């Protein structure tokens, strides 16, 4: 059952969390949602520290001690997440591949940002692959998460030009700037419709 009042948003990160920061910063004033929790699979993730500095509760579950037991790792993630009763779960640079069990638990209310113009370049190293292919443009995609990796319904995309002398790093920086605008905009639209 969806919350009355502001929708409750939990965010999962694995790294620095720049997208998470933009999402949290956007959820103020008349925004239909509020950030209630930020979690990570790495106790040392920079994004956790940034979330704490923004006053958002955090947790971490290290995936390594679970080895190949994804179900046990995910059960621990779900235990922490569901304690915060999220209406929406945002993956923001969360680098663990999730099983259908986890995805079904949050079916229809889990979003992800991917640094390519899906369906092109699912998976990793998207910018290097775009450059190798000689693409003239690149970009990012916000999509609903389904069991197929990087395959769910697309909510929105943003495009950037590929310029001469681009490296994967320079292209990634140009795309990341667009991610920081696209993800908050798509979260707002999604929360309004929920
Ligand atoms: C972003 O480029 C995102 O698209 C990808 O991982 C990167 C995470 O960046 N999945 P940050 O942790 O949000 O800064």
Image (cartoon, rainbow, N blue to C red):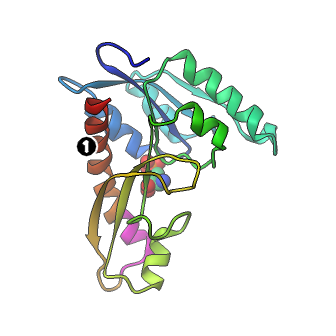
127 within the magenta span: no
Measuring from the top left, give residue 68's x and y in whole percent: 81, 45
In terms of depth relative to the viewer, which is nearer, 132 or 56? Answer: 132
Measuring from the top left, give residue 37's x and y in whole percent: 47, 24
Measuring from the top left, give residue 127's x and y in whole percent: 45, 71
Spot the residue most to the top. 4
Spot the residue most to the left. 30
- The residue depicted at 39 percent of the width and 45 percent of the height is 19
Quarter assignment of residue 63: top right
Mark 1: few/some/many CA within 10 Å (<14, 14-19, 20+): some
Location of mark 1 (residue): 185
Question: For disc 1, does the CB lie below 8 Å from ligand 1?
Answer: no
Q: Secondary structure at mark 1?
A: helix
Please give left or right for residue 52 compared with residue 39 in the image. left
Please give left or right for residue 155 compared with residue 103 in the image. left
Please tell me whether residue 117 is drawn above or below residue 150 in the rendered image: below
Residues rendered magenta in the picture: 166-173
Quarter assignment of residue 5: top left
């Amino acid at each position: 059952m969806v919350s009355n009042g502001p929708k409750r948003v939990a965010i999962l990160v694995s790294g620095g969390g720049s997208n998470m920061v933009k999402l949290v910063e956007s959820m103020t004033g008349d925004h239909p949602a509020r950030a209630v929790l930020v979690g990570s699979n790495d106790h040392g993730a920079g994004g956790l520290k940034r979330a704490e500095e923004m006053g958002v509760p955090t947790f971490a579950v290290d995936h390594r001690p679970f080895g190949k037991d994804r179900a046990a790792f995910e059960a621990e993630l779900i235990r922490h997440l569901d304690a915060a009763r999220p209406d929406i779960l945002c993956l923001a640079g969360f680098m663990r591949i999730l099983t259908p069990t986890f995805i079904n638990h949050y079916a229809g209310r889990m979003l992800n940002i991917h640094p390519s113009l899906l369906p092109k370049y699912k998976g990793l190293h998207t910018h290097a692959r775009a450059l190798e292919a000689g693409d003239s443009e690149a970009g990012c995609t916000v999509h609903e998460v389904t069991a197929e990796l990087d395959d769910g319904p697309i909510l929105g995309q943003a495009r950037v030009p590929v310029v001469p002398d681009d490296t994967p790093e320079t292209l990634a920086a140009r795309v990341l700037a667009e991610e920081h605008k696209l993800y908050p905009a798509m979260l707002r639209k999604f929360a309004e419709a929920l």
